[in-house]
Amino acid sequence: MNKQDVLLEIGLEEMPARFMAESTKQLGEKVKAWFDAQNISFEDVSLYNSPRRLAALVKGVAEKQDDIKEEAKGPAKKIAQDDEGHWTKAAEGFARGQGATTDDLYFKEIKGVDYVHVQKFEEGKQVKDLLPALGDIAASLSFPKNMRWGSKDLRYIRPIKWIVCLFGQEVIPTQIAGVQSGRETRGHRFLGTTASIDSPATYVQTCQDQFVIVDIEKRKQMITEQLDALSSEKGWVIPVDPELLEEVNNLVEYPTVLFGSFEEEFLALPEEVLVTTMKEHQRYFPVKNGQGELLPHFITVRNGNSEALENVARGNEKVLRARLSDAAFFYKEDEKLVIEDNIKKLDKVVFHEKLGTIGDKLKRVTDISTRLAAHIGADDETKQRVARAASISKFDLVTQMVNEFPELQGIMGEKYAKALGEHEEVAKSINEHYMPRFAGDQAPSTFIGAIVAIADKLDSICSFFSIDVIPTGSQDPYGLRRQASGIVQILLDRHWNISFKELLQLAHIEPAHETALVEFLTQRLKHVLQAEHIRHDVIDAVLDVEDIEPYAAVKKAAVLEESVKQESFKETAEALGRVISISKKGEDTHIEPALFENEHEKALFDAYQQVEVAAAEHTAAGQYQLALDALETLKTQIVHYFDHTMVHADDEKLKKNRLAQMVKLAKVIQSFANMNNLIVK
């Protein structure tokens, strides 16, 4: 069977760079899913893009759908035929549903029962007759932001300008929003022209001839090679931020690297201001020397060739000079600020209409911070610094610099606080209390920063839960999941054995919200354990306890992960789990040793008393392997106990006493983990 390639290109007005990667991926997934659903065999799918196009090239596509040959099973013989052997309505309906007649039916025995069957055969259709559906696939793409244009009903990321749809050298007729497919693509807006694509195999080269590099990785490679060459030529160090590189790569069709300069006097500004101005606002790469010091130069990537680069550089220098002049003015004005004056201004800045101002939030964060510091055992001097750090942690939000460059919140606060004579760790915490800012970011390095970071995040989570603003599905407008993950990360980084319930009590949350909040925080811890490739049953075991301490849970999970691999642990887990199961029918009441009827009851009671103390001591010392070892010593006594003792005795006093013993013992076991959740073989 001959094979052809299929090309689908959607030509658009310039798309926002931040949406391109996900849109390209989505197109590929939808195209693959459609070919699979249509039983059309193919070899591979290559994805291409540029700011003005999304494209999928499907290689090695069969000219005809795969034929469908399968056996369908119907009702049992006693349902399919009556006593006289005539086909019933059930059999006739089954045959019709399979596109057959009762003449095609036959019986096959399955586990001693005869069932009616039929052979289904559906001849594959010509693929070129099915490919017009690719227009619907392209039209079905979803985007974070859409627009309508003209009189069209379609909502799309940007207006569609052209469509290329080819099967080999043949144009496949399809349309989207009135735009008909063809074989003509459009080159670079200024350097290229309209070009005809002979076949999918020539697509990449045809675009390149028109100054459009549609290969995503090749565009990126061109940028990095030019950056390396410039770095080598000038003796510069060019720090390449991967996210900025990705964004720049999605802004250009034909990349050409160039550099510009700015006045050395601007180097007096904090490095973060210069870098943020270049990267966040202008998409420039900063330049450093071998000692890591900023130089008065920048690198940018032009969407075009190397002609008249000097003019382009001068234009970029003019824009950057204006930006830096503004930054210098804001910085000079902010040097006049008084922290207390800024704090008063925060009383007029709304945090949320139902939760008050940022000033109100600062008061809550300060209260939580001081209680948390005391709970962990901070001395009086440290507690005073924690309170000061929390109370001024957001004063820079009303500075001119942060108003212009929101990305610098916390960073400028630290610099201004140091300049105004605040204690170094207090100043640093203003920056660190936002950490971790994103997945993979580091936790605060200072004690005070960690305390205020937890308090700030905890207040946000508890406050929004109190007004029923709770993340659902993909909706999390206030980043509460990220903040909960930050709390977990800090607790683990600091090795602080504080439970979720203790944290929530420090925040003075309403009891009605405690269960939901504990579950919310637990889910973030679960993700941490999953990232460590801990078995799912081990995760369930260590998280199914009365009061979860994140740091302890991670350590216990590591210990259990190794133990469940040991064949000898199976009997231990079963014995401990049996106690937990039976304990659910009892009450936590006093145990009466005088009611013991055999030596095994007494032996288990004695073992319980010893293990209760040992497990608690080892856990408090962070010796989780020793704590589990102590629990394992109960196995023999538990087995002997159940071999010789009927827990559910006829005598009600005996029954209650034995169940009470199970409850006490189960509490000790479950203080480590719920062994019933383990899957042991």
Image (tube, rainbow, N blue to C red):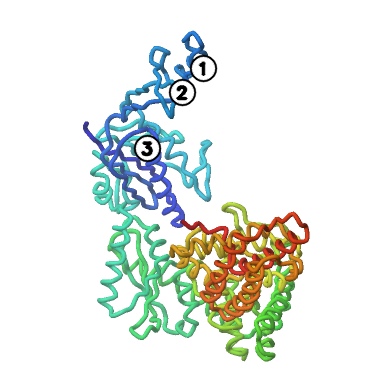
Q: Name the amino acid, label 3.
A: Asp
Question: Could you give the CA–CA distance between mark 3 and mark 2, rounded to whole angstroms?
Answer: 26 Å
Q: Name the amino acid, label 2.
A: Gly
- Snapshot quadrant of residue 397: bottom right
Residue 398, given in percent of the width and then of the height, sits at 65, 75
Q: How many marks?
A: 3
Are dots 2 and 1 in contact, CB under 8 Å? yes
Instruction: Give the mark nearest the N terminus, 2 or 1.
Output: 2
Identify the residue at the far front of this view.
598
Q: Name the amino acid, label 1.
A: Ala
Secondary structure under tag 3 reads helix
Identify the residue under disc 1: 90
Identify the residue under disc 2: 74
Q: Comparing marks 3 and 2, which lies closer to the viewer? A: 2
Taking 30 as reference, is 302 above or below it?
below
Instruction: Give the mark nearest the N terminus, 3 or 2.
Output: 3
Identify the residue under disc 3: 36
